[in-house]
Image: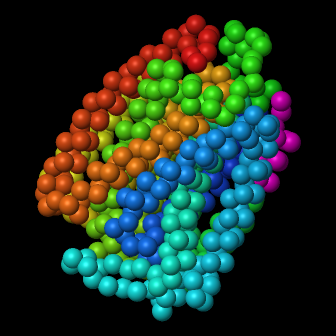
Amino acid sequence: MITGFLSRYYGLNKEELKKFLFLGLIFAFTIGIYWMLRPLKDSLFITLCCKTKIPYAKWVSLAVVVPLSMIYSAIVDRYPRHRIFYVLCTIYGLLALMFAYVFAHPVYGLDPVNINNFVENGKQLSIHTQLLSRIFGWAWYVYVESFGSLMVVLFWGFAADTTKPETAKRGFGLVAMGAQVGGIFGPWAVTNYVVRVGEAVLTFCAAIAIFLMGVMIFTFMKTTPKDQLEGYKAKDDGKAKVKTGFMQGAKLLVSQPYLLGILAIISIFEVINTIFDFKLKMLAGEFYKGTALSEYLSHFGMWVNIIGLICLVLGISNIGRKLGVRKSLLMLPSLVCVAVFVIYFNSSLWIIWGVNAAVKALNYAFNQPIKEQLYIPTSKDTKYKAKAWTEMFGSRGSKALGSGINVWADAVAPEVFLLISSIASLGLIAVWVWAAMYVGRKHKEALDSDSVVC
């Protein structure tokens, strides 16, 4: 009965529904793990290394992105697409086990006796007594950031490469719904169990879940019919292709206006989101400490995904199908523009909480599936290599840029920082709108002419 309803609601046949439900389950694991680790990333970094260092941690993440992008591109050349999942799941799973061991260690771990709490410039701060633990705190932050970027990029590249445009319009909303379910369960696990079992046990559970993701991809490839694994094929797909190196993604990115437009859409959102996020965490850090902060941030993440899931259940993906890609791409910048004004006139913790939740929810539930459709009329190099550079380097780079704005929070008065960040956000939104209109037009032209954009 449920499958029959979903088939009619999304306009999918039996095999297509089975495929997208399976992809939704895999993506639910991916996002669930990330949203389990994300609040722990921030709370543990604040505990181990001090919350004022968050902008600098974003910069360190950027420095790590370039070699990661190179390694990822080299893996794409060497292994079939599904095997890349096996490699990365193994690496990230083993690293999670290592972090779980460190967090549980009696000397270098999270025991309160190892944490030095103090007040500086009227702010309550904390830092681990052991230098090695602080180093692990920085490594932990970069680990979670890279997982959120690389695994999501790989999943959507895999989904786009095995899905035709018309099917994607119907099925990607179902995949996004799986992401929202995972995004609810991950923070829920932290909210309900971080006080009982601690961060180390939750990190160990995340490691097991990462290994299970690899098993799920293996099962998906074995059970999905071959005709359901066929992606978009343009008229020139039969031409011989030259094998490329890991720098091909960067070359494509800087040479193709279409990809630069996608980069602008992703980056500008992340810059503004980083500013919003920093305000939330700084205010939350004044009221909550230790596991209480982990619980608060995970509770926030859970509600972000609950809102996103409600939007999907109410049919927000249908709005995308009716509006088309071009008009749909303009919805998020419009909401963010309103959010900037709301925060400027009222920057209390609950207002910033609500604005952050609404913006993130719309991005995950509506904008993400629309944005991923932009990669369908592109080559394999674009889907895997240029996309990796765009999503990873663009996302991390934009967060570093947003952090560059955030460092002014300690240098100027609060009202001056609020004015600076608001003006910067509004200027970026204007560029965002222009890029969305351009990319949406090029996407439509490619599908109408049955061609590859780049």
Q: Left or right: where does residue 445 sit relative to residue 408?
A: right
Residue nearest the viewer, comparing 239 with 82: 239
- Counting from the top left corner in percent of width and height, residue 120 is at 26, 79
- Up-down relation of residue 409 to residue 419 (above or below): below
- Counting from the top left corner in percent of width and height, residue 372 is at 55, 33
- Up-down relation of residue 247 to residue 36 (above or below): above
Q: Left or right: where does residue 420 sit relative to residue 6?
A: left
Q: Residue furthest right?
A: 222
What residue appears at the point 54 percent right and 77 percent down from the top-left corner?
Answer: 133
Q: Quadrant of residue 281?
A: bottom left
- Up-down relation of residue 198 to residue 427 (above or below): below
| Residue 377 seen from this side | yes
Residue nearest the viewer, comparing 110 with 130: 130
- Counting from the top left corner in percent of width and height, residue 253 is at 53, 27
- What predominant SS class does the magenta segment belong to? helix
What residue appears at the point 44 percent right and 16 percent down from the top-left corner?
Answer: 441
Q: Residue furthest bottom?
A: 113
Q: Left or right: where does residue 371 sit relative to residue 245?
A: left
| Residue 164 seen from this side | no
Quarter that holds the C terminus: top right
Q: Which residues are magenta?
A: 213-226
Q: Is residue 290 magenta?
A: no
Quarter that holds the N terminus: top right
How does the figure colour the protein chain or chains? rainbow
What residue appears at the point 23 percent right and 38 percent down from the top-left corner?
Answer: 426
Residue nearest the viewer, comparing 343 with 200: 200
Q: Left or right: where does residue 421 sit relative to residue 396?
A: left
- Up-down relation of residue 433 to residue 447 (above or below): below
What residue appears at the point 24 percent right and 42 percent down from the top-left corner?
Answer: 424
- Counting from the top left corner in percent of width and height, residue 270 is at 40, 45
Q: Is residue 220 magenta?
A: yes
